[in-house]
């Protein structure tokens, strides 16, 4: 994500507010249902002057922010009043995994198992329709009497026709609450709301499904159960819910979204170059396949992140993804998405766009080749370090926002934590700069390879059970650098003062 001290966009690093970054993932499983309005990313950081970074106006610090969000699309908590529920999975072969607890009204004259089986049949048909490009089958699952919903479903199906899906799946996680009396009267028949995770895999890129939560209203008609809506709950939009999705392939990337084809091609070219830059420092132990989402507007960007407009002007891009539950799964299952904020991105010059996408792809590479999380300052600072590497932008120019605070006697005394990267709580650019300078100092003192070794050691899950990320990093400081984080922090504070002088 990206931000500037004065609210103008900067080159994003990774992340957004309120969500774990690669160093603060929540444990996954199959993803839980998300609450609507959830914020999926974490952080940004401020960077050098407009001239140094090639920005188009004003003196702004470039903030590069990228965040891998645990269960971003699948969600991180159940809606108010809902507890955990059994999961019903429509599997690849169409079989039913487990019964759902539905809480339906008794007017249908059917048992819960029968209603669940009917839902299973609808979802299996929809899966087939997507994979076989069969619009008639897709629409056959929709209530003909709900004309507005049916028209939207026809449009959505058309919007996704060019997306290269390897699979499309559903997981029913429970009910979505009770319909109001007026809504039941409007539907005119026995009805209930199912809470469903809709998953998809993109061919050649995803090794595990990317999930989004939907609340599907199911109503009984003379012909059987059909879908009558998706607005009786906080459904999470996907790109095809926002408009016609265009698709552009690069050598290493797949860019898709509602933006113009020209914008998608520009993103693909820059992301391909970023893959090479990341690989030169981090190494080749990651798939080097990246999916970039390119919405048309900042509003669409916010909708994809389940966020309002607050703080979005600070964010140029974010990285999201669902995390596997075990260390082995985290290293094996990939479905990350780099989401670009077109409004912020358009205000960046060539260097700013380079830094932003390289920062984001660093998060993708790290997550694909490590098994544990690290403290956020290391995650964001390292991504910024890789982003600025080779640009010719000086440390002072890239970090003038935090150095200004140091000169004013308000500089940081501790390495930044998660709250310092939350754009809804604070100006995040100085925190990105502070984290960047910490990693730059490590590279200057010990060499770039030792910086990489420190990260890899801190991001490797121990064999003997869970260890807190702070403890793992402390152990890595001692094993890789022969010092402690506390001693390093003292040196880093002095380094900030030296640069600010």
Image (tube, rainbow, N blue to C red):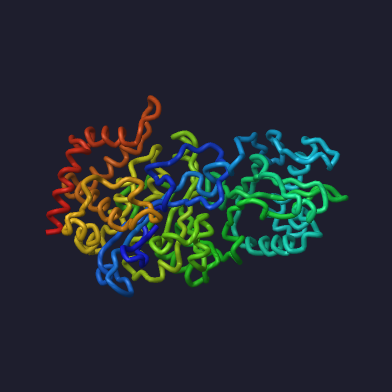
- The residue at the point 32 percent across, 71 percent down is 55
Residue 171 appears in which quarter of the rendering? top right
Q: x, y (%) of residue 328? A: 45, 35
Q: Is residue 357 left or right of residue 440?
A: right
Quadrant into which the C terminus falls: bottom left
- The residue at the point 23 percent across, 59 percent down is 399
Q: Is residue 150 left or right of residue 481?
A: right
Q: Residue furthest bottom?
A: 57
Q: Is residue 206 left or right of residue 345?
A: right
Residue 178 appears in which quarter of the rendering? top right
Depth check, front residue: 284 or 379: 379
Q: Is residue 152 above or below residue 89?
A: below
Depth check, front residue: 98 or 202: 98
Depth check, front residue: 191 or 161: 191
Q: Is residue 159 left or right of residue 468?
A: right
Q: x, y (%) of residue 194? A: 69, 45
- The residue at the point 34 percent across, 69 percent down is 350
Q: x, y (%) of residue 371? A: 40, 37
Q: Residue furthest right?
A: 222
Q: Residue furthest top?
A: 464
């Amino acid at each position: 994500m990206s931000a500037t001290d004065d609210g103008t966009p900067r080159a994003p690093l990774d992340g957004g507010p309120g969500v774990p970054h690669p160093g603060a993932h929540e444990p996954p499983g199959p993803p839980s249902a998300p609450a609507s309005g959830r914020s999926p990313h974490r952080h940004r950081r401020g960077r050098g002057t407009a001239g140094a970074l090639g920005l188009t106006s004003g003196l702004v610090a470039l903030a590069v922010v990228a965040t891998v969000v645990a269960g971003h699309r699948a969600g991180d908590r159940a809606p108010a009043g809902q507890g955990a529920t059994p999961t019903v999975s429509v599997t690849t072969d169409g079989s039913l995994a487990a019964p759902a607890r539905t809480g339906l009204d008794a007017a249908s004259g059917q048992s819960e198992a029968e209603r669940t089986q009917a839902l299973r049949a609808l979802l299996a048909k929809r899966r087939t329709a997507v994979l076989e490009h069969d619009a008639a089958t897709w629409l056959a699952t929709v209530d003909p009497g709900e004309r507005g919903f049916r028209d939207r479903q026809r449009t959505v199906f058309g919007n996704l026709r060019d997306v290269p899906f390897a699979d499309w799946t559903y997981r029913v996680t429970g009910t979505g609450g009770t319909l109001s009396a007026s809504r039941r009267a409007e539907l005119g028949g026995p009805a209930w709301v199912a809470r469903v995770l809709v998953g998809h895999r993109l061919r050649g890129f995803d090794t595990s499904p990317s999930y989004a939560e939907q609340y599907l209203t199911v109503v009984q008609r003379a012909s059987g159960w059909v879908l009558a809506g998706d607005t009786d709950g906080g459904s999470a939009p996907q790109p095809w819910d926002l408009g016609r999705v265009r698709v552009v392939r690069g050598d290493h990337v797949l860019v898709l979204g509602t933006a113009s084809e020209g914008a998608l091609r520009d993103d693909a070219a820059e992301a391909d170059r970023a893959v090479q830059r990341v690989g030169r420092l981090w190494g080749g132990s990651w798939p080097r396949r990246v999916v970039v989402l390119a919405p048309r507007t900042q509003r669409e960007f916010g909708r994809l992140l389940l966020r309002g407009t607050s703080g979005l002007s600070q964010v140029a891009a974010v990285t999201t993804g669902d995390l596997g539950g075990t260390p082995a799964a985290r290293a094996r299952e990939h479905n990350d998405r780099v989401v670009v904020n077109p409004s912020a991105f358009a205000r960046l010059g060539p260097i700013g766009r380079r830094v932003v996408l390289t920062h984001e792809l660093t998060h993708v590479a790290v997550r694909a080749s490590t098994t544990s999380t690290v403290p956020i300052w290391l995650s964001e600072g390292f991504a910024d370090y890789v982003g600025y590497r080779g640009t010719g932008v000086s440390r002072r120019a890239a970090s003038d926002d935090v150095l200004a605070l140091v000169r004013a006697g308000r500089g940081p005394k501790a390495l930044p934590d998660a709250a310092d990267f939350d754009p809804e709580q604070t100006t995040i650019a100085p925190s990105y700069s502070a984290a960047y300078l910490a990693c730059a100092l490590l590279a200057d003192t010990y060499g770039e390879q030792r910086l990489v070794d420190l990260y890899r050691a801190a991001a490797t899950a121990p064999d003997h059970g869970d260890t807190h990320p702070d403890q793992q990093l402390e152990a890595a400081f001692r094993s890789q650098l022969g010092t402690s984080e506390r001693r390093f922090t003292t040196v880093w504070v002095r380094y900030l003062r030296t640069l600010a002088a």
